[in-house]
Image (cartoon, grey):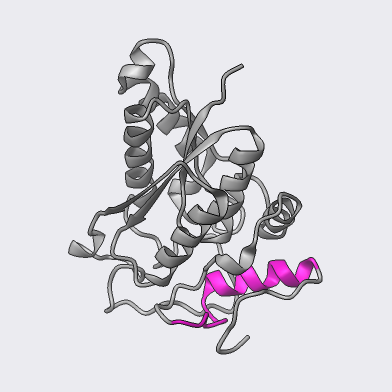
Amino acid sequence: MSIKRAVCLLSGGIDSATCAAIAKADGCALLALTVNYGQRHQRELESARNLAAFFGVAEHIQLEVNLRAWGASALTSDDIAIPHREALGHDIPVTYVPARNLILLALALSYAEARQAERVYFGANSLDYSGYPDCRPDFLRAFSKAAELGTKAGAEGKPIEILAPLQNLTKAEILQRGLTLGVDYSLTWSCYQGENEACGKCDSCRIRLAAFVALGLQDPISYTTK
């Protein structure tokens, strides 16, 4: 059986790193796509480059798509504060970037078809941030159908698979899976603040830290506060 090619959406965080490790463990030759969409936390782009080198990807495309042009998210507008919430709810948080995952998946799909890759791996997770509509299983099922209908590969009966292997895992379970696969999480970045050290206060930091605590481990990245 020939080795499958897979495009991994590589943001630089725990989820995308674990997803890439799973794709590699599945026997895929990896292609990585990282999108600079104008996110406040530009530091994650450096992590994405380091992870691409760590996984030995065959090609790493770094694409610029400026979603700051219309903002409307705490991640793409300096006028909206990054939330530090005491409790995570099921509402759609201000860190939601309008249609971001739809845009990223469309770009990954196009890249995959251009390179004749059979799969796209996407680190969506519906448990930690169930308020994000573009992380839900029904969204991914609908996108997979659109990918089948809207591509040459799909029209020829060889639709590109859209895989979200982390969909129903907790952050601790994701971390444990990646550790089992040998992921170096010191290379990853999760903080929403655009600093050289993680803030330890934003939702993303708090979820990350809680996952390490749940496993009885020390997070290998540095924080200004915890």
Left or right: 32 in relation to 201: left
Task: Report the label total.
Answer: 0
* Rendered image quadrant of residue 128: bottom right
Residue at 70% x, 66% y is 211
Q: Residue 12: where, in percent of width, then height?
A: 49, 60
| Nearest the eye: 21 or 56 | 56
* Residues shaded magenta: 196-215
Residue 211, magenta (yes or no): yes
Q: Residue 119: where, in percent of width, then height?
A: 49, 30
Residue at 27% x, 65% y is 72
Q: Name the image quarter holding the N terminus.
A: top right
Q: Residue 223: where, in percent of width, then height?
A: 58, 84
Residue at 49% x, 45% y is 57
| Nearest the eye: 154 or 129 | 154
Residue 126, magenta (yes or no): no
Left or right: 29 in relation to 148: right
In this picture, is 208 found above or below 193? Answer: above
Give the prevailing secondary structure in the magenta stretch.
Answer: helix
* Rendered image quadrant of residue 165: top right
